[in-house]
Image (spheres, grey):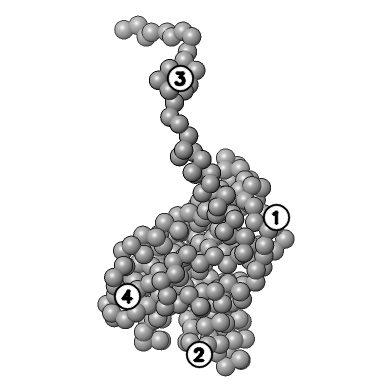
């Protein structure tokens, strides 16, 4: 369980542990992670906290070795680590380093976790389930959310690619696309203009949705009740553009210059 120190990752850890699963909780925020793991252990949960920088390939490989060493076999991998990054700024004002940081966690960390765990899962030949946490922002993009939305689009593509690559192997893939969730990451934030969505769910609701999907072929997991309408609005916009007639031959799609200057040899 990555990103397990708070929010959805913590709720997933608690839900799995409550059902009797042994859980390896990973996060870069080591102090917070170990506090939460201790709280769950006090409730008789079988959890192990592992501090790990998921943007470091070596650290992720070590995490995979540790998980399989502790558990013997891994049945579920929740690729959940994520950060919000800068919001409310247009793309050209977002510092490049901040945008790279968002991609490091929301995209590249998910790639590294998949690359570390999937070969080990295939080698064991047991059924397993990968859960990738993307977002409704992988579909619906509002103003001022370029870094976050772009990283979630990338993670959706990774999940879809894994689903295709693993078809027929016994390893299922699902992509979790929550809307607004009441977690520390988004508390106090206003939704990006144009993103829509007016429902908020709890992290525990999201964890319950994931738990119910395990072992099924459900790929898209939408947690918020307004997801269907938000998706319809997006795809209606796509269909509208697909159905537009092509420009006529007589129509100039771009204003032609009134005069040109030839370069002399």
Residue 170 numbered tag: 4
Q: Residues within 10 Å of mark 4 (few under 14, many from 20)?
A: some
- Label 3 sits on a secondary structure element that is loop
Instruction: Give the mark nearer the N terminus: 1 vs 2.
Output: 2
Is 52 above or below relative to 164?
Answer: below
Work out whether mark 2 precedes mark 4 in sequence or the reverse, and give the earlier one: 2
As measured in the structure, the alpha-carbon distance from the residue carrying label 2 to the one carrying label 4 is 23 Å
Spatial CA span between label 1 and label 2: 37 Å
What residue does disc 1 label? 190
| Spatial separation of the CA atoms under disc 4 and disc 1 | 41 Å
Say which residue label 3 marks.
Answer: 251
Contact (Cβ within 8 Å) of mark 2 with mark 4: no
User: CB of mark 4 within 8 Å of CB of mark 1?
Assistant: no
The residue under the point 29% across, 72% down is 169
Q: Earlier in the sequence, mark 4 or mark 1?
A: 4
Q: Is residue 220 above or below residue 85?
A: below
In the rendered image, residue 84, in percent from the top left (x then y), is placed at: 59, 58
Residue 124 location (% of width, % of height):
29, 81
Callout 3: few (<14), some (14-19), or many (20+) C-alpha neighbours within 10 Å?
few
């Amino acid at each position: 369980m990555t990103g397990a120190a708070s929010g959805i990752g913590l709720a997933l850890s608690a839900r799995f542990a409550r059902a009797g699963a042994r859980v390896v909780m990973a996060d870069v925020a080591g102090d917070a992670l170990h506090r939460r793991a201790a709280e769950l252990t006090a409730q008789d949960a079988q959890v192990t906290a592992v501090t790990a920088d998921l943007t470091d390939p070596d650290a992720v490989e070590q995490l995979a070795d540790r998980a399989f060493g502790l558990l013997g076999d891994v049945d579920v991998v929740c690729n959940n680590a994520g950060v919000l990054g800068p919001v409310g700024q247009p793309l050209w004002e977002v510092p490049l380093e901040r945008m790279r940081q968002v991609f490091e966690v929301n995209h590249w960390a998910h790639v590294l976790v998949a690359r570390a765990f999937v070969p080990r899962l295939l080698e064991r030949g047991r059924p397993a389930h990968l859960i990738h946490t993307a977002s409704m922002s992988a579909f619906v993009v509002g103003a001022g959310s370029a870094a976050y939305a772009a990283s979630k689009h990338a993670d959706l593509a990774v999940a879809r690619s894994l689903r295709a690559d693993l078809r027929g192997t016994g390893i299922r893939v699902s992509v979790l696309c929550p809307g607004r969730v009441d977690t520390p990451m988004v508390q106090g934030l206003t939704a990006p203009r144009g993103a829509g969505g007016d429902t908020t769910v709890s992290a525990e609701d999201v964890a319950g949705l994931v738990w119910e999907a395990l072992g099924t072929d459900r790929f898209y997991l939408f947690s918020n009740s307004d997801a269907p309408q938000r998706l319809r609005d997006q795809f209606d916009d796509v269909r509208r553009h697909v159905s537009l007639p092509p420009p006529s031959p007589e129509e100039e799609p771009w204003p032609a210059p009134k005069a040109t200057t030839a370069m002399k040899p």
